[in-house]
Structure formats: C-alpha cells, structure tokens
Image (cartoon, rainbow, N blue to C red):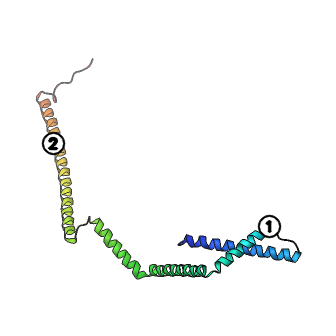
Amino acid sequence: MKFAPWLDNMKRLDDARKKEKKHLEENRQKCKRLGIEQSEVERRALARIEEEDLILQDEPVQEERRKRSRIIMKYYKGLQDVKKALCCSKLWILLTSIYIDKQDFIDRGGRTSAEQQRHDDLVSQREKLYEKERQLKERLHALQKEKKDQEEQEEKDQEDEEHQRRGGGGGRLKRNV
C-alpha cells in the first residue's frame, strides 16, 4: 500500500510473528511425534511467543488493538472516499477552472479585467508603432539607396560629358608602330 507505509511495516511485523509461531509449533509437533526433546533455543522462542500471546489477551491491550484497528479502518475508508472524489469528473472540471482562472490571473500580472483591457490596448498600440517604425526605416533605406544610385549615375554622366567635351570621342587613333 503506497499511501500508508507505516501500515505495511506493521503488517510485515505481524506476518513475520505469525510465521515464526507456526514454524515453532510445527517443530514442537515433529519433536513430539518423533520422541525427540526440543532444543533450548526453541523452548525459549516458544515461551516468548506464549508470553506475547498472554500480553495480547489482556483487556487494555485488546482495547488498544480495537482502537488501532478502528483508526486504520477509518484511514482506509478516508482513502477510498478521496479516491472516489478524485475520480469525479465534476471535481476535476472545478479544479481545472480554478487553476486556469488562477493561472490567467497570474499571467495578467494581478491586473483586473479593466486594467488588463487597457494594458492589452497599450500593447497593441506599441506593436503598431513598432511596425510603422520598421516600415519607415525600410522606406528611408530604400530612398537613401535610390539617392545614392542617382548621384552615382549623375557623376558618371558628368564624366562622360566632360570626356566628350575634351574630344575623347571623335579624335584620331594613334598607331602603334
């Protein structure tokens, strides 16, 4: 049982005690049947078990065992009730709605609905401004590139004109001899 390890330990102890008692009783009966005398160790163990049985038959001990048994049964019943409750789909729906509401509240940073709406509006305005800024930067970059291309073209045209004025186009060709 994974919910109550202390109960498992008590059960193991009781089971071990019962097995030991059964084993000693079997040995005693074999010894009687075969006519062999029991060893001193077996006699002491059997005497110890008989003493424990006498103690367990006392009224206060019996009352204590009944109380313990009742507590254990209440514990088991409580575990079963918890299992049934946790298997209830309505409970899970309720828990998830509470968790989701709480998580939503945490995600909102503790803001109320009106504050959250205002916050969302400001965030959307900020995003629009960022988008507009990006578009304007792209346009500026394109205009600067266009202006640079025009200036280069004008310089090239001026150089060609100057070259034409100096007579670079219709002059004689020199011969290499």
Indicate the amino acid at tag 2.
Gln
Determine crowd level at label 1: few under 14, some 14-19, many 20+ residues with C-alpha closer than 10 A.
Answer: few
Q: Does 19 sit left or right of 96 as displayed?
A: right
Q: Secondary structure at mark 2?
A: helix
Q: Quadrant of residue 99?
A: bottom left
Quadrant location of the C terminus in the rendered image: top left
Point 37% across, 75% down: residue: 96
Q: Nearer the viewer, mark 2 or mark 1?
A: 1
Mark 2 lies on residue: 150
The amino acid beneath tag 1 is: Glu
Residue at the extreme right of the image, as rendered: 35
In the depicted view, which residue is nearer to us: 5 or 129?
5
Where is 168 relative to 8, above or below?
above
Q: Earlier in the sequence, mark 2 or mark 1?
A: 1
Of residues 117 and 133, the one nearer the viewer is: 117
What residue is shown at x 34% (from left), y 76% (from top)? 97
Whole-percent x, y for residue 87 in the image: 46, 80
Secondary element under disc 1, as helix, strand or loop, is: helix
> Based on the displayed image, in which of its 4 quarters is residue 135 positioned?
bottom left
* Residue 106, percent from left and from top: 30, 66
Calculate the distance from the C-alpha at mark 2 to the C-alpha at mark 1.
Answer: 118 Å
The residue lying furthest to the top in this view is: 177
The reply to whether residue 42 is in sight is: yes
Q: Which residue is mark 1?
A: 40
In the displayed structure, would residue 127 be above or below residue 159? below
- Quarter of the image with the N terminus is bottom right
Q: How many marks?
A: 2
Q: Residue at x 21, y 53 (%)?
A: 134
Q: Tags 2 and 1 in contact by the CB under 8 Å rule? A: no
